[in-house]
């Protein structure tokens, strides 16, 4: 399998090259040159496959000969070694719980796969790799945790000061070692822009081996398909495939679901569940894509005004808006609606939603209400405890803090504060001063 750049189809890279580079040299995103189709008989026997077998079969064509079968088996098994339960909430709506990994959010899957792939690829190189990543909340923790202690890899994480929850912040600022957290006085988009500019900087490119761990990296993006397959294994009514609602910000997660669909996974429809950041919704309605500044909301991991992965979605559908609209509907959900549904669902169905899952729930409900007989699931992308500051005032109940978080709350914060300034970041990276902050 080769990957081409979404800016230039003749620029090609292998899986390992694409994973190491992150972004294509021409600023495009890497995209598989063909969409592998599921082997025949795969869907009929899907219920008999173990998670590990399934994951290996799905990932193998994307990885090609970049990783041996034995090593890939180990990598996928370590990536998905926690449960992905599909839990009924109402008669028509289930939730795919993606928060049973080490940092309690779905990003653990992509981060674990990517860190293990990179660790594998740098084994025989003499230069250290620096992973540079911007986070709107959950990426940082998942990436930090995934890479913590991986030999030969330094991780630098930029996050917007005051715009991530306390739980998210401790997950990325308490590790130390090969993990450096940078607290930026700005928005997530500022952080993302700083990362993009660093990748384009000639001097940095010459002196450092820089790569990205944002969801644009193929090694993070592609394994996110897996849990859509795990959900289908658990989907009872195979004759009536699910409507799938995905709380979306940078659109990497939903793009992985759509990729699975294009390779043969049954789905009736996809719903992009957005908060006030409605760039994609506006695009689907008007046909004109206009990037916006991001707006802060309660579902802060989805506060993205210019979703990077959207070009991949367009690529999947041959840049044909009508084909995309056949399978994808977007909704924009307000903070008030989000709070109301958290309370209602808790009272009526005794299920505690996090703000992102709540957006997914409402969007799914909205779609189902105009499609008779349809059923579906939404992705519960984070554990509610990560957003206790939003949820507790709404439900009036305390969420017990899991032990894995409790131990972090007492640890000293290790971070470097910075203005959204490309030069300051560059100096830090070039100084080699990362080590000093460990
Ligand atoms: C990152 C994140 C999202 C958005 O996922 P994208 O792939 O960026 O669309 C949704 N919910 C949570 C909890 C997240 O951490």
Image (spheres, helix red, strand yellow):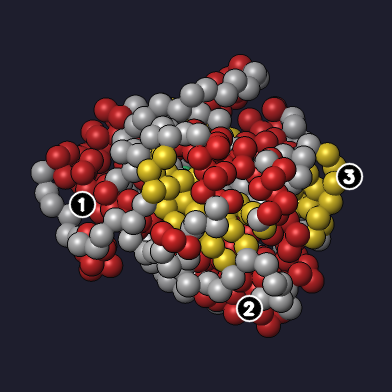
Q: Which badge, 2 or 3, comes first in the chain's sequence?
A: 3
Judging by the rendered image, the residue that carries numbered circle 2 is 73
> Does dot 3 land on a helix, a strand or a loop?
strand
Q: Is residue 400 left or right of residue 241?
A: left
**Crowd around label 3: few <14 · some 14–19 · many ≥20 (10 Å):** few
Question: Going 68% across and 54% down the picture, which residue do you hit?
Answer: 207
Q: Quadrant of the N terminus?
A: bottom right
Residue closest to the far left: 396
Question: Going 34% across and 27% down the picture, which residue do you hit?
Answer: 334
Residue closest to the far right: 10
Q: Nearer the viewer, mark 3 or mark 1?
A: 3
Tag shown at residue 350? 1
Q: Which badge, 3 or 1, comes first in the chain's sequence?
A: 3
Q: Is residue 356 left or right of residue 216?
A: left
Question: Going 74% across and 46% down the picture, which residue do you hit?
Answer: 24
> Considering only vertical position in the picture, is 329 above or below 44?
above
Tag shown at residue 10? 3
């Amino acid at each position: 399998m080769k990957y081409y750049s979404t800016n230039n189809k003749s620029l090609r890279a292998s899986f390992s090259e694409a994973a190491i580079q992150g972004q294509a040299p021409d600023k495009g995103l890497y995209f598989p040159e063909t969409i592998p189709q599921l082997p025949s008989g795969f869907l009929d026997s899907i219920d008999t496959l173990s998670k590990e077998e399934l994951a290996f079969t799905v990932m193998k064509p994307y990885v090609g000969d970049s990783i041996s079968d034995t090593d890939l088996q180990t990598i996928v098994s370590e990536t998905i070694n926690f449960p992905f339960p599909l839990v009924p909430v109402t008669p028509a709506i289930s939730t795919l719980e993606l928060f049973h990994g080490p940092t309690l959010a779905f990003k653990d899957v992509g981060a674990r796969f990517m860190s293990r792939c990179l660790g594998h690829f740098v084994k025989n190189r003499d230069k250290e790799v620096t992973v540079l990543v911007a986070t709107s909340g959950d990426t940082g923790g998942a990436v930090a945790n995934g890479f913590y202690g991986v030999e030969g890899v330094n991780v630098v994480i930029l996050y917007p000061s005051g715009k991530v929850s306390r739980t998210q912040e401790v997950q990325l600022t308490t590790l130390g070692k090969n993990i450096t957290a940078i607290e930026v006085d700005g928005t997530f988009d500022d952080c993302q822009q700083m990362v993009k500019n660093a990748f384009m900087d000639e001097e940095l490119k010459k002196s450092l081996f820089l790569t990205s761990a944002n969801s644009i990296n193929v090694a993070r993006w592609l394994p996110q398909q897996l849990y859509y397959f795990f959900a289908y294994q658990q989907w009872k009514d195979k004759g009536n495939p699910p409507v799938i609602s995905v709380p979306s910000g940078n659109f990497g997660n939903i793009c992985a679901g759509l990729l699975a669909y294009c390779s043969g996974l049954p789905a009736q429809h996809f719903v992009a569940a957005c908060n006030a950041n409605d760039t994609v919704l506006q695009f689907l309605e008007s046909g004109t894509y206009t990037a916006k500044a991001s707006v802060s909301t309660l579902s802060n991991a989805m506060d993205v005004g210019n979703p990077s992965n959207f070009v991949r979605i367009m690529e999947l559908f041959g840049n044909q808006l009508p084909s995309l609209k056949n399978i994808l509907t977007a909704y924009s959900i307000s903070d008030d609606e989000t709070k109301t549904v958290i309370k209602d669902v808790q009272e009526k169905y005794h299920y505690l939603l996090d703000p992102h899952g709540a957006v997914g729930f409402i969007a799914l409900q909205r779609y189902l209400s105009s499609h008779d007989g349809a059923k579906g699931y939404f992705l519960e992308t984070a554990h509610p405890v990560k957003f206790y500051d939003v949820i507790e005032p709404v439900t009036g109940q305390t969420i017990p803090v899991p032990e894995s978080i409790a131990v972090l709350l007492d640890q000293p914060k290790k971070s470097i504060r910075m203005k959204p300034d490309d030069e300051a970041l560059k100096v830090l990276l070039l100084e080699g001063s990362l080590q000093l902050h460990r």
